[in-house]
Image (cartoon, helix red, strand yellow):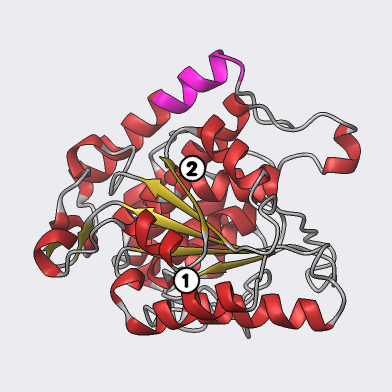
Amino acid sequence: MVAAVEAAKAHPDPDALANLALVRHLHPVPDPRPPTKEAALGERAPSIAELERWATILRIECVRMLAVAKSGHLDSSLSAADIVSALYNRVLRHDPERPDWPERDRFVLCKGHAAPIQYAALAHHGYFPLEDLMGLRKIGEHLQGHPDMTRTPGVEVSTGSLGQGLSMCLGIALALRLDGLEDTAHVFGLLSDGDCQEGQTWEAVTAAAHYKVSNLTAIVDYNHLQTDGTTEEVMDLGDLRAKFESFGWDAVEIDGHDMEALVRTLEAASEAPGKPTLVLARTVKAKGVSFAENIPHWHHHVPNDEELERALAELAAYEELLRREGGGVRA
């Protein structure tokens, strides 16, 4: 575990070393290298199997990070892993060597509490060293509990207050229009069920349709769970797809863990002229860790030693299966 060893060197204090000892002996997968740059691949895009394996590696990183940090939101990160893998490894036009490239696509993690999954993707693409992941939520490190655009390379917007993210996405999309980049750069925002319970989200939904912002795609990580129970119990969202459509959006509902459907839908997101797009992605909280899936308690729970080993063992077994089936991560 290269990341854990390097993090221990950077944080020699006893508490940090004790935390790292919990995961240092676990070897779910070799620390993989970032994917080969698109230019070196020529015309070949990463395969569905490769994207699925990357999603599993990102999940493994999230489990590792929270085991060291002793706090955070594991289930919300794991539910979004397939979406984030599809975006960063295939759909988004981005360049870690030029994070301020004007023509890049923008990704906004509206559900900012799921920051670990974005951090894992950014690190594996070279925005910052992999060993930085072990500094999650540590004083003096740059990986905050919620994304901070002033501290973490690759983060477009500081998020965390549910309901504000889509308004930020809309503002970015309108700014791109002013800069003459509306047809070049796309904005993707990843929302939670909780975001859709906030009034400001629906102001943004209304405004995006009114201004015919076609370079905006909202992806809802639609798992029907939040801290206090199901969304149906806390605040029923009803027919969410129909609501967005009634506001003038182009909307599609898919399985948020079906990589082929994710890629197909996200790559076609800008095809509806004059309309923003909603991708309602049905997901499972804590996807990939069977004993934590769809259990509200895990929204704030961090794995203990036994749960940590079980989670990493499950993910490692699935990662190995994907590798054997042709999901080899390019080196």
Q: Residues within 10 Å of mark 2 (few under 14, many from 20)?
A: many
Residue 312 position, x and y percent, is: 35, 37
Secondary structure category for the residue under label 1: loop
Q: Which mark is residue 82?
A: 2
Name the residue rendered at 74%, 83% in the picture: 175
Residue 321 falls within the magenta-colored stretch = yes
Structural distance between the alpha carbons of marks 1 and 2: 16 Å
Secondary structure category for the residue under label 2: helix
User: Can you name the residue that lies furthest to the top here?
Assistant: 325
- Front residue of 314/247: it is 247
Name the amino acid, label 1. Cys
Residue 243 position, x and y percent, is: 36, 63
Q: Is residue 261 left or right of residue 41?
A: left
CB of mark 1 within 8 Å of CB of mark 2?
no
N-term mark: 1 or 2: 2
- Residue 93 in sight: yes
- Front residue of 326/164: it is 164
Residue 35 position, x and y percent, is: 72, 40
Residue 65 position, x and y percent, is: 42, 57
Residue 261's place in the image compared with 297, above or below, is: above
Q: Residues within 10 Å of mark 1 (few under 14, many from 20)?
A: many
Name the residue rendered at 32%, 41% in the picture: 287
Residue 44 falls within the magenta-colored stretch = no
Name the residue rendered at 57%, 69% in the picture: 108
* Residue assigned mark 1: 110
Name the residue rendered at 23%, 54% in the picture: 224
Name the amino acid, label 2. Asp
Q: What residue span does the magenta drawing correspond to?
A: 318-326
Tell me the quarter of the picture where residue 158 sits. bottom right
Q: How many marks?
A: 2
Residue 110's place in the image compared with 292, above or below, is: below
